[in-house]
């Protein structure tokens, strides 16, 4: 059955999400209960608080996803859930809910890697063209992943320290902006100029790895220095200067990787792919190439369960089902 219905669940961080996806490509419902306003008070995600809110929301969100898709558990072919990576207590809520529901209704469970989900968010918009390259940029990950076929992932480059989104969040915090900092910096950077000339880290020649902690530290030190001297800080220009450094490296390395591997498609995924300037720069850089650029619409960039359902479809057709021993795995490898 190519049109299988999957109920998907995602609780790896601070969004409690459930969705119904048909045949890995069609979104029937997509419910996201965000905890952003709660964590904003603490300036970041507090794991214990996240787990507690997932427990409160999970049943409501699952039921709403079924109702909005106009289906019941009887119509569902499998239950998919993010098994990792992420916060262990948060992941556990989703994994246990998925197992309980699947067991009660006699349906198989499918464990999904969160990053595979981010990549497959794009399949809800357009079909994959192999071989493809994916740049995954989120709060926890910055990776270049090469794929020759569905469900096969080869990480060819990754960050050696901070993830891109993490650098955004930490720089935003140093500028006293609310959590999460990415969208704040994105907005401010539209108004500024690259006047501070922060470093761009390319690492060794030919490496597809990334490093953002040097840049983050340079920005924080600069702010500290300006404050000490009582000099004015141009927040818009700091935001633009920081963002230009991040985006130059992301676009250059991704372009190089896409060319070296001769891919047909480039997918940009993860929360940071919501960034306006990153989207525009990728567009420009790939405009005159044969590589088709795919970036999901904003609501599929940040964490959601639709992407987990899309990635799970591939495993469903391979009958790659998990047992009821499926456990949350905060450090799950791809
Ligand atoms: O994928 P995601 O929702 O969660 C993780 O799996 O980490 O990504 C969240 C990250 C945060 O660091 C957030 O600041 C960043 O994505 N982000 C952005 C933008 N929107 C979200 N970064 C830059 N510009 C944005 N517009
Ligand atoms: Zn994510």
Image (spheres, rainbow, N blue to C red):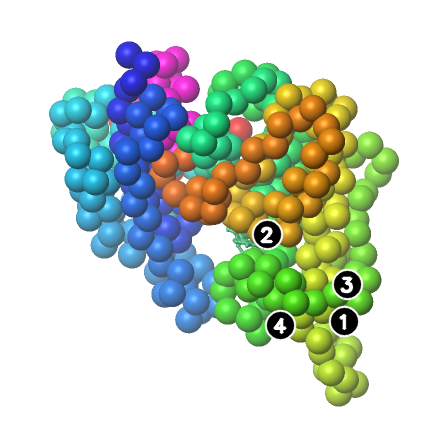
Ligand 1 within 8 A of label 1's CB?
no
Which of the two labelled residues, at mark 2 and mark 1, occupies the earlier sequence position?
1
Contact between marks 1 and 3 (CB within 8 A): the answer is no
Magenta stretch, main secondary structure, is helix
Distance of label 4 from label 1 (alpha carbons): 11 Å
Q: On the image, which quarter does residue 131 sit in?
A: top right
Mark-to-mark CA distance, 3 and 4: 16 Å
Q: Is residue 68 above or below residue 266?
A: below
Mark in the foreground, 2 or 4: 2
Eye-nearest disc, 3 or 4 = 3
Local secondary structure at mark 4 = loop
- Residue at x 54%, y 16% (from the top left corner): 149
- In terms of secondary structure, where does tag 1 sit? helix
Name the residue that disc number 1 marks.
Answer: 222
Specify which label sits upstream in the sequence, 1 or 3: 3
Residue 187 on image: x %, y %? 58, 63
Cβ–Cβ under 8 Å for marks 2 and 4: no
| Magenta span | 308-322
Residue at point 67%, 22% (across, down):
263
The image quarter containing residue 308 is top left
**Residue at position x 50%, y 61% from top?**
180
Q: Nearer the viewer, mark 2 or mark 1?
A: 2
- What label does residue 259 carry, if any? none
* CA–CA distance in space, label 2 to label 3: 16 Å
Q: Please report whichever mark, 2 or 3, sits nearer to the chain's N-terminal start.
A: 3
Look at mark 4 in the image and give the residue it sits on: 175
- Distance between the Cα atoms at labels 1 and 3? 14 Å
Q: Which residue is mark 2?
A: 276
Tag 2: Cα neighbours inside 10 Å, few (<14), some, or many (≥20)? some
Q: Residues within 10 Å of mark 1 (few under 14, many from 20)?
A: some
Q: Is mark 2 within 8 Å of ligand 1?
A: yes
């Amino acid at each position: 059955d190519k049109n299988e219905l999957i109920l998907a669940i995602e609780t790896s961080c601070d969004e409690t999400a459930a969705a119904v996806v048909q045949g890995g490509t069609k979104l029937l419902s997509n419910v996201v209960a965000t905890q952003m306003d709660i964590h904003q008070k603490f300036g970041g995600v507090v794991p214990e608080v996240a787990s507690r809110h997932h427990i409160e929301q999970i049943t409501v969100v699952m039921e709403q996803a079924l109702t909005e898709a106009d289906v019941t558990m009887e119509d569902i072919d499998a239950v998919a859930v993010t098994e990792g990576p992420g916060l262990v207590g948060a992941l556990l809520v989703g994994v246990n809910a998925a197992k309980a529901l699947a067991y009660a209704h006699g349906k198989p469970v499918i464990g999904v890697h969160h990053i595979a989900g981010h990549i497959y968010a794009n399949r809800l918009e357009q079909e994959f063209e192999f071989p493809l390259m994916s740049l995954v940029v989120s709060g926890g990950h910055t990776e270049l992943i090469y794929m020759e076929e569905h469900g096969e992932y080869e990480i060819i480059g990754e960050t050696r320290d901070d993830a891109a989104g993490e650098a955004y969040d930490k720089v935003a915090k140093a500028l006293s902006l609310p959590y999460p900092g990415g969208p704040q910096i994105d907005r401010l950077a539209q108004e500024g100029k690259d006047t501070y000339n922060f470093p761009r880290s390319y690492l060794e020649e030919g490496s597809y790895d990334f490093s953002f902690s040097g840049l983050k530290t340079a920005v924080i030190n600069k702010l500290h220095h300006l404050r000490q001297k009582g000099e004015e800080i141009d927040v818009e220009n700091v935001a633009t200067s920081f963002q230009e450094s991040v985006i130059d490296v992301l676009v250059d390395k991704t372009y190089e990787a896409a060319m070296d591997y001769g891919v047909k498609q480039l997918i940009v995924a993860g929360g940071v792919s919501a960034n306006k300037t990153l989207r525009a720069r990728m567009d420009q850089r790939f405009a005159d190439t044969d590589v088709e650029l795919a970036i999901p619409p904003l609501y599929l960039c940040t964490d959601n369960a639709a992407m987990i359902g899309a990635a799970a479809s591939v495993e469903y057709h391979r009958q790659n089902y998990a047992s009821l021993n499926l456990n949350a795995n905060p450090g799950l490898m791809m």
